[in-house]
Image (spheres, helix red, strand yellow):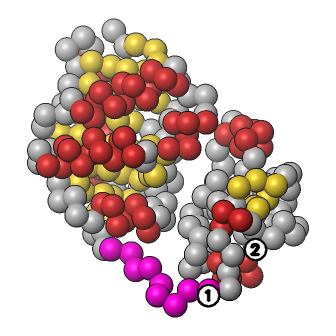
Amino acid sequence: MAKFLDTNGVSHYLQQLINGSKEKLILISPYLKTSQRIKQSLEDQDRMKIDIRIIYRTNYLDPAGENWLKPLHSIRTSSCPNLHAKCYLNEKEAIITSMNLYDFSQQNNHEMGIYVEKNNDAELYASIYNEAMRLVRISDEIKITVAQVPKNLDKSLKPASTVPGYCIRCKTEIKLNPMVPYCSKCYASWKKFENDAYEEKYCHICGKPNSSSLVKPSCYDCYKANKDVLEFPLQ
């Protein structure tokens, strides 16, 4: 019988699912920016030569993620446009959940999920597995290359940690991070619908009025001036 999971339960069972994989592991999530603990588990499974497939949405892998994945030879990554499902499974268990494979989601959001064991609910597990494999088949495999870090950065730029950012919805001052351009209150409101392209009001970097969104959180001038020193989801 399927088991209900709250936020802590999803994180716990996901870690167990990854660590317990013996043959295959499929991770499906629009966002891919994992915690250090998940990375360590995946690195260990890579050493064990487990067949690992990661499906995520197009243009949602940052340079640091690319550099981390490059030496992991047992992991194959694919992109699936319009992906919204979050599903994690191995050869004996599966999790369907609202939680992305994204450290911000694991640490800040209220999530739910369902845990299924193949031995206890073979039919349900088979349905999840078959849909997961369909997404694998329709996704485009990506060959990861090491992202280059520019050598000639502008030395006059202030470190990001000393410069405030702005919530793109309410303009509250927050930590400068284009990957997380909402304050906690506005992010909770956005999370109800999860429309990545929903038009907001302000540039995350300068705070001036701008047609921003989660995938394009800054005005073009700020993006152009900071693209070599800050991570952007898409611009």
Residue type beneath disc 2: Cys
For residue 200, which quarter of the picture?
A: bottom right
Residue type beneath disc 1: Asp
Q: Which residue is mark 1?
A: 154
Residue drawn 77% across the image and 43% down it = 186
- Say which mark, if any, is on residue 219: 2
The boundaries of the magenta stretch are 146-155
Rendering coords of residue 189 (x, y %): 75, 39
Check the image and report above or below for 44 versus 70.
above
**Residue 200 visible, this angle:** no
Between 83 and 12, the one nearer to me in the picture: 12
State the SS at label 1: loop
Residue drawn 66% across the image and 63% down it = 161
Residue 121 within the magenta-colored segment of the rendering: no
Q: Classify mark 1: residues with Cα within 10 Å, few (<14), some (14-19) or many (20+).
A: few
Disc nearer the start of the sequence (2/1): 1
| Inter-mark Cα distance, 2 to 1 | 20 Å
Circles 2 and 1, Cβ within 8 Å, touching? The answer is no
> What secondary structure characterizes most of the magenta part?
loop
Q: Quadrant of the N terminus?
A: top left
Rendering coords of residue 112 (x, y %): 53, 24
For residue 228, which quarter of the picture?
A: bottom right
Residue 103 is left or right of residue 123, and the answer is right
